[in-house]
Image (cartoon, helix red, strand yellow):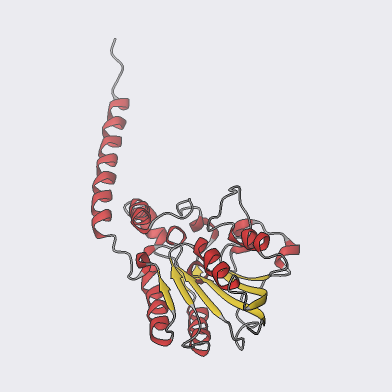
Amino acid sequence: MKVKPTLKVLSIDFDFFQVVDLDTLFHYPDGHDFMTDFSKFIWANHYADPREDEILRKVSVNQKLFAEIKDILISNASSEKPVMIANSHKYIYDFIVDEMNTKKWRDLVVVNVDMHHDMFNDNEKLDCGNWVSHIYRKFPGTYISWIANPISNEAYGLGENLMQLVQTDFSSIRNQQFDMIFLCRSDIWTPPHLDSYFDELYHLILEHYWDIRVDRQVSKPRDLTEELEAQKKVYAERIKMAEIFKKELAQPACD
């Protein structure tokens, strides 16, 4: 079997395409690798508060970069090119390892399109926030480049040295051909009202690629109807109890 020189992987995290400011990011939930159903419950809790809802609804998608990634995906289309579509970024690890273990490739290059660097965190076990370091340990010498959201530096304090190595547009990959494509929705980092855009990428891939592995959790946009109705009732009851407590505090103390 002839060994090919380099496995080139395009890794796309949908949270990259968000147009969001730093203050709004502080309103996002926190956590790693939650299942989609649990993410729906968490996000519904945020949307149920009218003030939070107004803030979150301002988050949009960068239309220019979104259109460009669609062109890149179409130009890379191939019947033999493996693609994985998942909820969490952690699944890229096995996706890459399985291909490298076929012994067809000598080297590994990954281009990570992502709001987060995913290099390391305080967890030793593999998760969506540290898969890059696990890939490095598994395949020393791997080259990984990062295309970051413009807010990434301000949000995560990356420092000037790291940011000099980071790009924020697709100029470096517009004409590149990749051997594998990975796309994740990152449910806990992406407000559900943006899911229709992810769904566009999902169906574009289904139309232009053949060797596809799909996490069923992301096969359709998240519907928060039931969760949001329940959370709004909880929120209304909480407001009611706060008003009662406020009135009781205003009552004069008994002699």
Residue lying farthest right? 161
Q: Position of residue 65 (x, y in %)?
A: 52, 79
Q: For this rendering, which residue is in front, 95 or 208? A: 95
Residue that appears at 60% across and 80% down = 170
Q: For this rendering, which residue is in front, 147 or 82? A: 82
Q: Please tell me whether residue 127 is drawn above or below residue 175 in the rendered image.
A: above
Q: Please tell me whether residue 186 is drawn above or below residue 145 in the rendered image.
A: above
Q: Is residue 128 left or right of residue 239?
A: right
Residue lying farthest top? 255
Location of the N terminus (image quadrant): bottom right
Residue that appears at 67% across and 65% down = 139
Q: For this rendering, which residue is in front, 92 or 128? A: 92
Q: Is residue 228 left or right of residue 12?
A: left
Residue that appears at 51% across and 73% down = 182
Q: Position of residue 14 (x, y in %)?
A: 48, 70
Quadrant location of residue 154? bottom right
Quadrant location of residue 212? bottom left
Location of the C terminus (image quadrant): top left
Q: Position of residue 39 (x, y in %)?
A: 38, 55
Q: How many callouts does the rendering have?
A: 0
Q: Is residue 31 left or right of residue 234?
A: right
Residue that appears at 31% across and 27% down = 250
Q: Position of residue 140 (x, y in %)?
A: 71, 64
